[in-house]
Image (cartoon, rainbow, N blue to C red):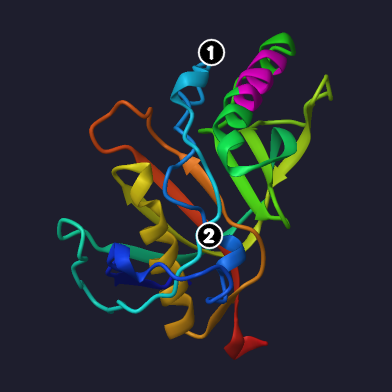
Amino acid sequence: MTERATVSPPKPESKMPMGRSAMSRHRLDAGRPGCPPIATQVTVSRASRPPGGPYAGDLRHCATGRARGDRGGMGYEVETVDLQPQPAAVVRGDAELDGIADFLGAAYGEVAQVLASEGLAPAGPPFARYSLHDRSFGIEAGFPVARTVTPEGRVVAGQIPGGHAARTVHHGSYDDLPAAYEAVEEWLAHNGYVPTGDPWETYLDEPDVPEPRTLVHVPCRSLRHA
């Protein structure tokens, strides 16, 4: 069953040092990896990649029902979904904060070239999954595909995780994406869930649209059924 609630995003001043919240390892900082072109295209502009990075903050502004947020009246509707795993073609690696944009640009370009050489088309929009390391970030970036890709260069077969996840859609600047993660974390805490893995972002629009949409997934489980 899908559960839904609308959560208001916190104000920018709610940012706190890394480690203050349960999901501090699963936060992406202001300055998104610039969204790549939609998945039906095989050319990727490195200049438009959003810079990713971890973001740590605590969440104080949560509301149920149809609450409105602080940023321009925008609220986040959070829902839980059960997902089927999906094959993906990805590039994996580590990057420091100031190198994430270049990593993503190169990764999407390499994956697109391999898919074209194998006669495959992306089966959905591009995505990126992040994990926090000591001084850098683990990144898995690429496209979902209909079948397992043959490894070539840095491009390998991957998978978009299945299972239970909380998700929300962020509309607007990548710089404001931390609010979406905070809304999800607040929803999890208030509804008896805990995160169980690294989150991922799916970029639904090209970055030059007025309000690009970013779909945020956070794997989770319910404490009530533990």
Range covered by the magenta-colored residues: 106-114
Question: Number of marks in the image?
Answer: 2
Is the residue 183 above or below the residue 136 in the image? below
* Gap in angstroms between the C-alphas marked 1 and 2: 29 Å
Which badge, 1 or 2, is on the more N-terminal residue? 2
**Nearer the observer, 192 or 140:** 140
What x and y, as percent, mark residue 153? 82, 20
Q: Residues within 10 Å of mark 1 (few under 14, many from 20)?
A: some
The residue singled out by tag 2 in the image is 27
Q: Mark 1 is on which residue type? A: Thr
| Residue at position x 59%, y 31% in the image | 104
| Residue at position x 38%, y 32% in the image | 205
The answer to whether the residue labelled 1 contacts the one labelled 2, judged by CB atoms less than 8 Å apart, is: no
Dominant secondary structure (helix, strand or loop) of the stretch shown in magenta: helix
**Nearer the observer, 187 or 101:** 101
Name the image quarter holding the C terminus: bottom right
Is the residue 85 above or below the residue 121 in the image? below
Q: Residues within 10 Å of mark 2 (few under 14, many from 20)?
A: many
Find out whether residue 111 is within the magenta segment. Answer: yes
| Residue at position x 42%, y 84% in the image | 190
Q: Mark 2 is on which residue type? A: Arg
The residue singled out by tag 1 in the image is 43
Between circles 1 and 2, the one closer to the viewer is 2
Is the residue 217 above or below the residue 187 in the image? above
| Quarter of the image where one finds residue 154 | top right
Q: Residue furthest left?
A: 73
Find out whether residue 187 is within the magenta segment. Answer: no
What x and y, as percent, mark residue 193? 54, 80
| Residue at position x 53%, y 59% in the image | 27
